[in-house]
Image (cartoon, rainbow, N blue to C red):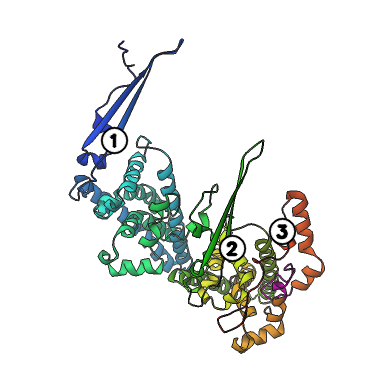
Amino acid sequence: MDVPLQTKYTLSPITNNIPRSHRPSLLRARVTCSLTPAKKSHPNREKLVLEKRLVNPPPSNDPTLQSTLTHRLWVGAGCTTVFASFAKSIIGGFGSHILLEPALAGYAGYILADLGSGLYHWAIDNYGDESTPLVGTQIEAARGHHKWPWIITIRQFANNSHALARGITFTVLPLVLACNDPVVHGFVSMFAFFILFCQQCHAWAHERKSKLPPLVVAFQDMGLLLSRRQHVNHHRHHRTLYELLHSEWEKVLYVQFGYPLRPITNNIPSTHRYSLLHVRVTCSATTTTNKPQAKLVVENRFMSPPLSNDPSLQSTWTHRLWVAAGCTTLFASLSKSIIGGVGSHLWLEPALAGYAGYILADLGSGVYHWAIDNYGDESTPIVGTQIEAFQGHHKWPWTITRRQFANNLHALARVITFTVLPLDLAFNDPVVHGFVSTFAFCIMFSQQFHAWAHGTKSKLPPLVVALQDMGVLVSRREHAEHHRAPYNNNYCIVSGAWNKVLDESKVFEALEMVLYFKLEVRPRSWSEPNSEWTEEKDISNNHKV
């Protein structure tokens, strides 16, 4: 029986449903139509399925990969608006004798542009299709990119960047005409510049190292631009590493959903994978009358700790840049405190605020140390990496003395940069900056104070030994109590001044009881010490385990 197609399902030309970037390479398309008879009072339904079978990718001379005059004009317009914004920042900064604030705003724009690129990339990778208004073309291009990612390396520059250039022109041009603030334009120009060129950074991340300009290779190695090694993981897992500039936000944003059975080495702390010798996996299944239950136990057995030349203990260019950024924001805050104090003849108040910052930093380090020692695991959002690092630290505490300076501090330096930088831009009060600069300095360098507390006294600088003996920094003797059973005291690692107060008043024990009765969560310190908490001795110098 012939059933007529409903008029609302028009059969459009087949090529209209093929992505524009792939039409020249179309070899075969198959259309499947199925008709379902009506049931009861429901009308007949027609189903049209278009199966696109693209056998070959677009060739290098495909017109869709070439730049047109329109593309070049849009890129020219985008670059012009970005340059105008940058010029207003420079000229306005020199005219009002403001140099630091526009520079810090520009750095904030660079950091947030990477975040913005990641969020946008995640959205178009996971939602919408080619019929989505405004961004449909980019969505279908992103889908095609996952099939043939290397195509982006043969796409001409203006062709690759014209869509973003159009968006930048329409958003930045009104700001250039309406605003003259050098700080605003310091942020806008850097943010817009990196968004405009993020597709080019993306293309460089797919190109072979030998074909890239030496300066681009240097920037990738330093962590200023996204490297091929970093971005290749996005095309393997499809759920991570969405950022297109330098990919530092991925460490903050990545959250594991569900419990997929990943490769065994992914469940091993990243700081210990290089020293992995043996892993035992035990699987057991128990059948009940109500519900079947399955249990998977992965037991990590590390026969030796990380070696002194382990790459996970070395500093990278990215680590050094984050530490430099953190130190720069601290110096800016301290400078504002000193200059503001001199200008307003205030000396005592900023000094007292700085002392309060030093005291409260020790308390903050203790509370944070207690929390990550007792709660959460490596899958905890944002702080999971630090939790697994601290658990490994309890097993081999002496490895912190072999961890290079920037490697040890870069995580805290990143946090300090993101929290202190807005305060540098928003406030000029010398008292506020007296507190902020000292508090942030002690928090950022608390891991270095922690490392010194594990060092041999004869190998420490004399000034550090003197400060430890004076109680200004936490001492080796005091912190050693934290690494002895029952592992529930001496958490503070700046000066240790709060340790006695917190331990004698049993503040942490009271908090643990509250959390247990309210949330039924047991802290790790309540459990009997096991191999994860028991310290192993350093055997690299012929010491016995």
| Tag shown at residue 148 | none
Instruction: Report the quarter where the C terminus lies.
Output: bottom right
Left or right? Give the position of 142 relative to 346: left
Q: Is residue 203 above or below residue 444?
A: above
Q: Residue furthest right?
A: 505
What residue is pinned by disc 2? 388
| Residue 384 x, y percent position in the rendering | 58, 59
| Residue 457 x, y percent position in the rendering | 64, 86
Instruction: Report the quarter where the N terminus lies.
Output: top left
Residue at 42% across / 58% down in the picture?
Answer: 185
- Closer to the chain start, of discs 1 and 2, is 1
Left or right? Give the position of 29 relative to 364: left
- What amino acid does circle 3 point to? Pro
Which residues fall within the magenta stretch? 481-497
Q: Is residue 342 visible?
A: no
- What amino acid does circle 2 point to? Glu
Quadrant in which residue 49 is drawn: top left
- Measured in 3D between alpha carbons, the distance from the residue under mark 1 to the one under mark 3, in whole angstroms, is 55 Å
Instruction: Judge whether residue 482 is colored magenta.
Output: yes
What residue is pinned by disc 3? 523
| Residue 148 x, y percent position in the rendering | 29, 49
Q: Circle 2 sits in a helix, a strand or a loop, which is it?
A: helix
Instruction: Judge whether residue 487 is colored magenta.
Output: yes
| Residue 313 x, y percent position in the rendering | 51, 73
Left or right? Give the position of 69 relative to 266: left
- What amino acid does circle 1 point to? Lys
Q: In this view, does 243 lie above or below 100?
A: above
In depth, the one of 160 and 268 nearer the eye is 268
What residue is pinned by disc 1? 52
